[in-house]
Image (cartoon, rainbow, N blue to C red):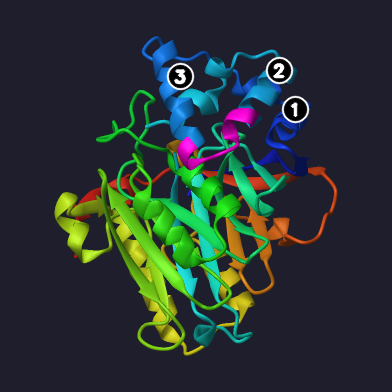
Amino acid sequence: MKHSMEKQKVSYYELEGTYREIGRQIAGQEDTGKWYIPAPEYFTREALEEALGLYDMYCPGIREELEGFSEAAGIPVKDIAYTWMTMLVPRCSGLILTGKKTLDGHPKIARNYEFTIEDEDLKLCRTAPAGKYAHIAGTIVEFGRCEGINEKGLAVSMSSCGFPVSNMPGMRAPKIKGLQFWAVIRSLLENCADAQEALEKVMQMPIAYNINLYLADPSGTGILFETMDGEKAYEQISPNEGPQYLCGTNHIVIEQLKHLEPAGMNNSIVRYDRLKKFAEEKERYSEEEIRKFMLAEYPEGMTAHYYKDGFGTIKTVILDPVEKRYSICWLGQEENGWKDYLVDEKKGACVEELLYRNEDGNPEFFAFRPIG
């Protein structure tokens, strides 16, 4: 298959203080202008106030962070991309294992995240807002989070459930008024101590994005929460009894919601079946085995290089709730190496240039078929 090797910058940085101070710190970064995207005409002043009111209720502090950024960057709050894109786009795979399935006895969340290079932050951030839980997470639209782990050991990740929902042209329009996934995940990381508390919060939240949400904590509790067009369901595991893993990709996997969308992309169904097979092949796995599986190329593993078609691996992540560790391999390339970050440890900001492989897409990869 035709491919090329290309270079891309990735970064890690640290934010700390009040939300307003954090907003000013973000404005000091070199790519600040990337998030100036004038709001569309339909996002009126009334819509702005409604959105900010929603954020105040479910994502407390983000208004002050946006205002701090606005003041320092000279960009109106209304025209910060996060502000108007968050009230209501990625594809990924997720696997939760209890400690009974791992050699070190630690529960794990493993996830691959696929999208286009141009639309990604390609940043990892340690954020410690005053009075909230510190966390390490991947950023999205700068102020949002797409997966991470907090100081209590709560690990959170996601994958899109069905075609991505957005208020951008060409995406699936939201069926209800509510939040984008990146606001939900940040709120959980900053405000919840364990998986059960996070579940209670998302069951109350208005979530407009269709999402498979993965939750795990040091106790070994694992939860797969799924929402489609406002309807919600979840499955839960523990090391005490029953199945010792949960997994999902980009289609509905919880039986009671399948009637809402009984089909999925061929690649999503293949990846889901492969995740299940992997989880059941052995009694226990080393973390190295999990890493190698996630980086293996589709269909044997979870990695793909179709960046021009919106399905290139941006990052592979392992979250360890016991160690409160975020481990990442950027851009689906084992040659880029793995980097480990602990929530309780500051490392200092860094920017590096890494390689990624860009391949031409395969039409069969994106075909739709019924869910088995």
Identify the residue at image location x=63%, y=76%: 288
Front position in the image: 300 or 126: 126
Q: Which mark is residue 147?
A: none
Q: Is residue 172 covered in magenta? A: no
Question: x, y (%) of residue 9?
Answer: 72, 39
Where is residue 76, by image quadrant?
top right
Image quadrant containing the C terminus: bottom left
Q: Mark 1 points at which residue?
A: 24
Q: Compared with residue 290, is residue 280 higher up or lower down, i.e. above or below?
A: below
Q: Residue 71 carries which label?
A: 2
How far is disc 2 from disc 3 in space, using C-alphas? 17 Å
| Residue 252 relative to residue 372: left or right | right
Lower sequence index among marks 3 and 1 = 1
| Residue 28 relative to residue 134: left or right | right
Identify the residue at image location x=56%, y=83%: 102
Q: How many labels does the image show?
A: 3
Callout 2: SS: helix
Where is residue 153, by image quadrant?
bottom right
Residue numbers of the magenta segment: 57-64
Question: x, y (%) of residue 32?
Answer: 70, 24
Mark 2 and mark 3 residues within 8 Å of each other at the beta carbon: no
Q: How busy is the neighbourhood of tag 3: few (under 14 within 10 Å), some, or many (20 plus)?
A: some
Q: Name the residue under label 3.
A: 48
Amino acid type for the residue under numbered disc 3: Leu
Front position in the image: 3 or 180: 180
| Residue 228 relative to residue 166: left or right | left
Callout 3: SS: helix
Amino acid type for the residue under numbered disc 2: Glu
Question: x, y (%) of residue 187?
Answer: 53, 47
| Residue 312 relative to residue 354: left or right | left
